[in-house]
Amino acid sequence: MLKSKKRYLLLSIALLSAGLLFAQQNWQKVTLPKYAEMATTFKNSPSQYAETLTYGLEGPLSLESISADLNAIKKQGIKVVTIEGGYHMKEPYLSAGWFENVKMIVQELKKRGMHLWIIDEGKYPSGFAGGKFSQERPDLRMQGLVIAKRINLKEEETVNEKLDASIISAVAVNAENKANEIISLNNHQLNWKAPQGNWQILLAQHRFKTSVTRAANNPTGGKDTVNSLCDYLNPAATRQFLEFTHVQYKKYIGDEFGKTVLGFRGDEPEYNFTPWTPELLNIFKQKKGYDITPYLASFFTPFMTEKQKLAKADFWDVWSDLFRDNFFKVQANWCAQNGLEYMVHINHEDKLMDLARSEGDYFKDMRYVQVPGVDAIWHQIWYDNVADFPKLASSAAHMYGKPRALSESFAAYTPKPTVADARWVVNEQLVRGINLFEYMFWPSSANGKAKGESYLTDPAFPALAEYSNRASFLLSNGIPAAQVGLYCPTESMWLGDEEANTSLLNIAKQLLEHQIDFDFVDNQALTSVFKLNKGSFTNLSGQSYRTIIIPETEIMSDQALKRLQDFAKQGGKVIFLGHQPEKKFDKTFLQAKPVELINWAVKEASGNLTDNIIQKISSPDVQLEHSVPAIKYLHRNWKDAEMYFFFNEGEQDQNLKVTLNGTGKAEIWDVNSGTIKPITSSAVNGKTQLQLVLPGHESQFIIIRSNRTSK
């Protein structure tokens, strides 16, 4: 632990020298607090750490209605609201009247000591600026690669056709055996004679195309393509989006940025088709060294060749880089320059194969985002669902030096939650590292009498709000202590490797059920972010991983494998669960090579977390006297204390002996009441042993206060 804290101090000095922590407030950065600081602020934690509630601006607004709404919301224990443009507003979204209303809301929040997040769009997904791209900047609209035309040919038939300049790639598919043949297009001319079989030629074209949007100004209230999203891969389009939105907010409420106004929240930016941007071919050639054009049409065939799959992975690698750098990073930088945070969740976090297709790479997308997020809707997290995907957001935060991780929770929830249900769902995510919740949904009203979802207006909800505010404060401070990294094989998912996804989720479930906490880690972190020293990978939060687990994966980067080998040589543990990767890539997937026999790592062919493998993982910081899969935990380091959070996901009460890393005086911090009381414990072999009493569906914070801690 001392080494971890020393690394944290050195990291902070380095970041300060680079100017990256300039003007950051405590709630905006990773901290290493003292016990006394946390104890002093525990009962009345700073409101910047508090949960938020989506306040939908529906219908006409007035000072009286806003005041009544905010009074009702505050009465329910909510200290922060997140505003969203809604339907039937008298002042249209992004009009001068809209911004005047937002200014009025900010003033009313300030009077009440409350804070504000702003959803960056009039509904969702983020990036269409209420329709302004379609209306004012159609040149910066989203673009995609599509099949423009299909031509059927029988054996010996020919086609000779002059093509539109936007058609750039062609492939012929044999309907009888699913084989395909790439067709060269010279000077926009298609000349091809069908060999044996029945063939269909697919002609790929780039054109303006948008994912569907739901717009506040759409009279139907539905999803359609009337209001086009911007070109996410073009930084000029993102800057224009900021000009339409963030810059205008700054004119009206900029003096409250970083004070009453905490930041902007993005919502589900995604592609539901193959992305395109005008400079993509040139950028691809610069990055990969070859022309991707001949392969593009083959991406739409049902049975791609191995070579075509590898070329498609190269394409996904490039456009996901552009998504990260030209959309997410541009917004994060603007927010940082204005004292704000950018938080965003994307789509399909619970379905990683779908996410890889539509978002590219979760961890690339979140690389520079200040508050990475997920979306917990419908029935994704419930008593009968194992749902570890919230760890995506917390892992991104941990890896990349961010203190907070968001969950937008309870939108369209089925079944509708009670307060008790909501508490369980909150705890299920807290114990997986989420520490900022956006509760859905509270509409505004003209008379101030509109009410939110029934669980929000329940008399029991203020107690949940108080609980989650304190819990999030505790879980937002300190250095994460998980020592295990679980590799997320996104690159294999680009190749269509379903086994990689299944293996990843299976291992994640087994780790948590054995009280082995972990973070998902990714290729960019292993190759270019983590610092390697003495058998330990240290991330940007100052947290160290001593074990890296690799699930079933078809392909890995050569650089990642070399880093893992160096890690193993220095004493780190590398464990392959399932077969080792078959291929490795360097600059391009297309030139992937076979992986040599890996003899520097531990392997388990079954792909499961066997007893033998558990013994080889880094020494656990939590040991139960007997197996209880329902008990989950988190551990964070303070400067002079250890913080543990336990949650019993099951219905059965638990009362068992637990051994924890850290020595000193053990205490229970009751987040319901804000009180601190000692608990009987004993020191055993440099650790602390105590009795853990956890009724079904209940949680507990245990702090081990170092004997060196001053009173």
Image (spheres, rainbow, N blue to C red):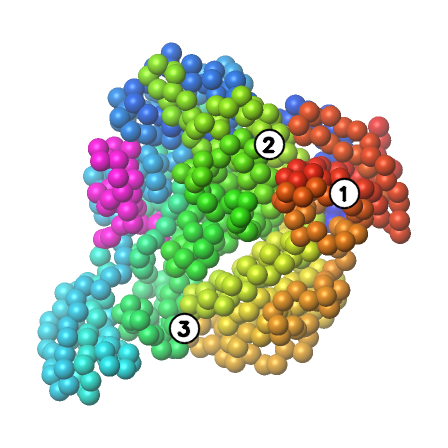
- Dot 3 amino acid type: Leu
Q: Quadrant of residue 646?
A: top right
Relative vertical location of residue 51 with respect to residue 205 in this rendering, above or below: above
Magenta span:
208-235
Q: Nearer the viewer, residue 144 or 696?
A: 696
Give the image quarter of residue 524. Answer: bottom right
Q: First in sequence: mark 3 or mark 2?
A: 3
Query: Label 3: how many residues lie within 10 Å, few (<14), some (14-19) or many (20+)?
Result: many
Disc 2 target residue: 468
* Whole-percent x, y for residue 493 in the image: 45, 65
Can residue 598 be seen here? The reply is yes
Q: Which residue is mark 1?
A: 655
The residue depicted at 69 percent of the width and 61 percent of the height is 547
Q: Decide whether the magenta segment is chiefly helix, strand or loop.
A: loop
Tell me the number on the disc at residue 310.
3
Horizontally, residue 616 falls left or right of residue 186, namely: right
Regarding residue 642, the answer to whether it shows in the image is: no
Nearer mark to the viewer, of 3 and 2 = 2
Magenta highlight on residue 228 = yes
Instruction: Note whether 602 is above or below 244 in the view shown.
Output: below
Disc 1 is placed on an element classified as strand
Disc 1 residue crowd, few under 14, some 14–19, many 20+, Cα 10 Å: few
Q: Tell me if label 1 and label 3 are in contact, CB under 8 Å.
A: no
Q: CA distance from mark 1 to mark 3?
A: 52 Å
